[in-house]
Amino acid sequence: MRTAFIESLCEAAAGDPNIWLLTGDLGYSVLEVFSQRFPDRYVNVGVAEQNMMGVAAGLAMSGKTVVAYSIVNFVTLRCLEQIRCDICYHGASVKIVGVGGGYAYGALGHTHHGIEDLSVLGSMPGVDVVAPADPIETRLAVQTLLQRKGPAYLRLGKAGEPKVHQNSPAFGVGSIVPVREGRDVLFITTGGLLEEALRASQQLVAAGLDPAVWSNPWLRPFDVARVTAAAKDFAVIVTAEEGVITGGLGARVAQIISGMEGSRARHIGVGVPPEVGPSALSQKAARARFGLDANALAAQALAAMKRS
């Protein structure tokens, strides 16, 4: 995803002299391609994320489109007050990019677990929140967000994520991306869990079910209409997110279902509980622990279908 991000950013910057890139002393072996091509629009502010957001806000209010890049926790939680007061309250066109979403840096411990970002940024005023599923969605997200005014948060994985989509899907603002059609069980994922859901769907097919799989890159704005329709069509909806379950994808879907009439869906929200967990887990181990790998998702869907 990082490669897709920087390539798309460079393409956009080549045609728009107002695009700037800031980093908090991170991104080595990734950002050099931008800094070498556009040295006058690249600033490494050092390990000073709060200051970086102030600089980004100032540039944005002088007419620039600013991308601020770092590891998820450092570019969101460490400087949340500056994001809230300097960027959000002024509607500044700053695109915050967090790399290492979920447990991509899990082995480095709690300081690098990027699990609260989607919930926290989703509560800030006026922020687009996007977590693409693969490099193809990442390219589309970068292109879309750079064309939109105001603040945004883009959550990426780390590196080496596979291309799940064979071709570029429709990527409308605030829209879900259907990946597999079905009629019994619906998996909705955000971020890099799409591949796990597709593997889980294969297990359900083997069990005689017809599952659907949707990618939901847009946490904000959110595709309320499609989720509302799904709650009337599917017996079971399973949401999966590599982040805290509080305030994320599952919470949004649950809120929609609880407030509507005519829902037939049983909702199973799978994510990370909002508590202090193990200090060091690989991403693979973390997904298994929290029920986010293909085997666990398939098992939970099957159990819910039996209860239904």
Image (cartoon, rainbow, N blue to C red):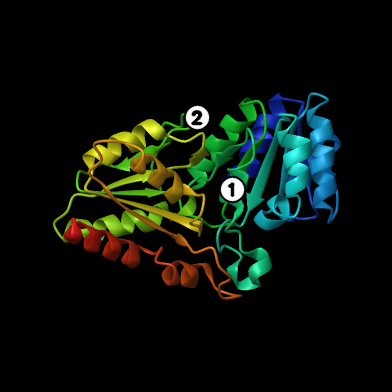
Q: Mark 2 points at which residue?
A: 173
- Distance CA(mark 1)–CA(mark 2): 16 Å
**What residue is shown at x 46% (from left), y 32% (from top)?**
171
**What residue is shown at x 30% (from left), y 59% (from top)?**
200
Residue 1 visible to the viewer: no
In the image, residue 186 lies at what x, y percent?
28, 48
Residue 149, compared with residue 117, is above or below; it is above
Q: Mark 1 points at which residue?
A: 155
Q: Nearer the viewer, residue 121 or 14?
A: 121
Label 1 CA crowd tier, 10 Å (few <14, some 14–19, many 20+): many
In screen coordinates, is 61 left or right of 296?
right
In screen coordinates, is 288 left or right of 148?
left
**What residue is shown at x 20% (from left), y 43% (from top)?**
183
Name the amino acid, label 2: Val
Quarter of the C terminus within the rendering: bottom left
Q: Count the numbered circles shown.
A: 2
Mark 1, secondary structure of its residue: strand
Mark 2, secondary structure of its residue: loop
Labels 1 and 2: the sequence-earlier one: 1
Residue 147, compared with residue 253, is above or below; it is above
Name the amino acid, label 1: Arg
**What residue is shown at x 74% (from left), y 36% (from top)?**
87
In the image, residue 156 lies at what x, y percent?
58, 50
Residue 150 visible to the viewer: yes
Which residue extends farthest left? 208
In screen coordinates, is 183 left or right of 75?
left
